[in-house]
Amino acid sequence: MAFDLDVGLLIVRLVLGLIVAAHGAQKLFGWFGGYGIKGVGGWLESMGLRPGALWAALAGGAEFFGGLLFALGLWTPLASVLIAAVMFVALFTVHLKNGLFIDKNGFEYVLVIAVVALVIGFLTGPGAYALTP
């Protein structure tokens, strides 16, 4: 059985990028059951991140546009930094105090997303099936 690294990278980029973009769409537009900028902004302000609407727009934009770019393999290093930045902010502001495991709202999920994005963005590259390999 042959293994095609480029197909594997495409699958990882599509899955990760589109999931991250969907989370951004929740924040920006209220799609997929999200709360939109106003709702997310209020939640961020409750954690001390002010102005909440600005931080919601920045996080949502980084996730939405970074996720789409990542999925397409377009400007992959930039896309990976956008994704990882939001994930590390979430890790340190929300999840770290809860430990590793997601069942306790821990940081395992955001850490995996950040690491996979950075590895593809800076170590492996996006593969042959990308708009800018």
Image (spheres, rainbow, N blue to C red):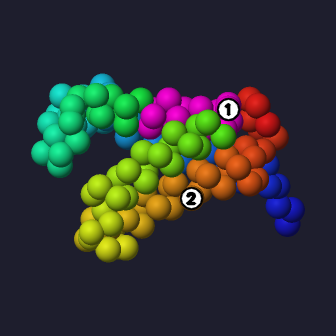
Residue 62: quadrant of the picture: top left
Location of residue 131 in the rendering, given as x and y in whole percent from the top left corner: 74, 29
Residue at the (86%, 62%) spot, across then down: 2
Residue at the (27%, 69%) spot, across then down: 97
Residue type for callout 2: Val
Range shown magenta? 62-76
Q: Which numbered disc flags the more N-terminal residue, 1 or 2?
A: 1
- Is residue 124 in view? yes
Q: Of residues 3 and 66, which is closer to you in this image? A: 66
- Is residue 19 in view? no
The residue beneath circle 2 is 115
In this view, 49 is above or below 113: above
Q: Is 6 left or right of 111, judged from the image as shown?
A: right
Residue at the (50%, 29%) spot, across then down: 65
Q: Specify the quadrant that holds the N terminus.
A: bottom right
Residue 14: quadrant of the picture: top right
In this view, 110 is above or below 129: below
The residue beneath circle 1 is 75
Location of residue 92 in the rendering, given as x and y in whole percent from the top left corner: 35, 59
Q: Specify the quadrant that holds the C terminus.
A: top right
- Is label 1 in contact with label 2 (beta carbons under 8 Å)? no
Name the secondary structure under disc 1: loop
Location of residue 16 in the rendering, given as x and y in whole percent from the top left corner: 54, 48
Residues at marks 1 and 2, CA–CA distance in whole angstroms: 17 Å
In this view, 132 is above or below 8: above
Q: Residue 21 magenta-drawn?
A: no
Residue type for callout 1: Trp
